[in-house]
Image: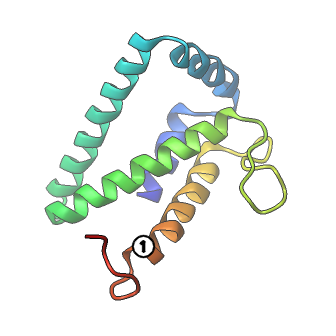
């Protein structure tokens, strides 16, 4: 998943497009129809990623989980790449580092998603809610 996020970042989310992405994000946020369209695009992309993983022999459930976690990392990375200063909780107040490439931001976001999910998904660590 990390390689896919980096490849997409190199192709579509170059540093020189950051300002355009930031403005586009603001336009989408202000328009309900565009928000709906953006959500549908995300669903189609997720379905394509899941299908691609399945075609590579990844089991169905693993494909679905990897896609969902990848999509979450993508969303976090995209938001951070559009913001110039994002609080990552490490005291620096800077989640992107001015000039960081999307792939770097996405790799950090994916690592954070994995770390956040690990305690929740660890078998026997916490009972499941009923």
Q: Position of residue 75 (x, y in %)?
A: 50, 41
Local SS, label 1 = helix
Across and down, in percent, residue 43 comes to 29, 35
Tell me the quadrant of the picture where the C terminus can be found.
bottom left
Q: Is residue 49 above or below residue 15?
A: below
Q: In this figure, what is the number of numbered marks?
A: 1
Q: How is the image coloured?
A: rainbow
Residue 27 spot, x, y in % from top left: 57, 13
State the residue in front, 41 or 56.
41
Q: Residue at x 51, y 59 (%)?
A: 110
Q: Is residue 54 left or right of residue 84?
A: left
Q: Residue furthest bottom?
A: 124
Q: Which residue is mark 1?
A: 120
Q: Measured from the top left, where is residue 48 in percent x and y?
A: 24, 40
Which of these two is toward me, 103 or 88? Answer: 88
Q: Residue at x 33, y 81 (%)?
A: 127
**Crowding near the residue tagged with mark 1, few <14, some 14–19, many ≥20 C-alpha atoms within 10 Å:** few
68 to the left or right of 113: left
């Amino acid at each position: 998943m990390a390689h896919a996020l980096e490849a997409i970042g190199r192709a579509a989310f170059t540093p020189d497009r950051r300002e355009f992405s930031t403005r586009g994000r603001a336009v989408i946020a202000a328009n309900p129809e565009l928000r709906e369209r953006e959500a549908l695009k995300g669903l189609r992309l997720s379905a394509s990623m899941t299908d691609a993983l399945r075609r590579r022999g990844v089991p169905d459930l693993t494909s679905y989980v990897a896609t969902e976690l990848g999509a979450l990392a993508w969303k976090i990375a995209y938001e951070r790449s559009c913001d110039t200063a994002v609080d990552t909780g490490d005291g620096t107040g800077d989640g992107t580092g001015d000039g960081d490439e999307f792939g770097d931001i996405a790799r950090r976001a994916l690592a954070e998603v994995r770390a956040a999910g690990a305690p929740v998904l660890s078998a026997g660590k916490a009972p499941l809610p009923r």
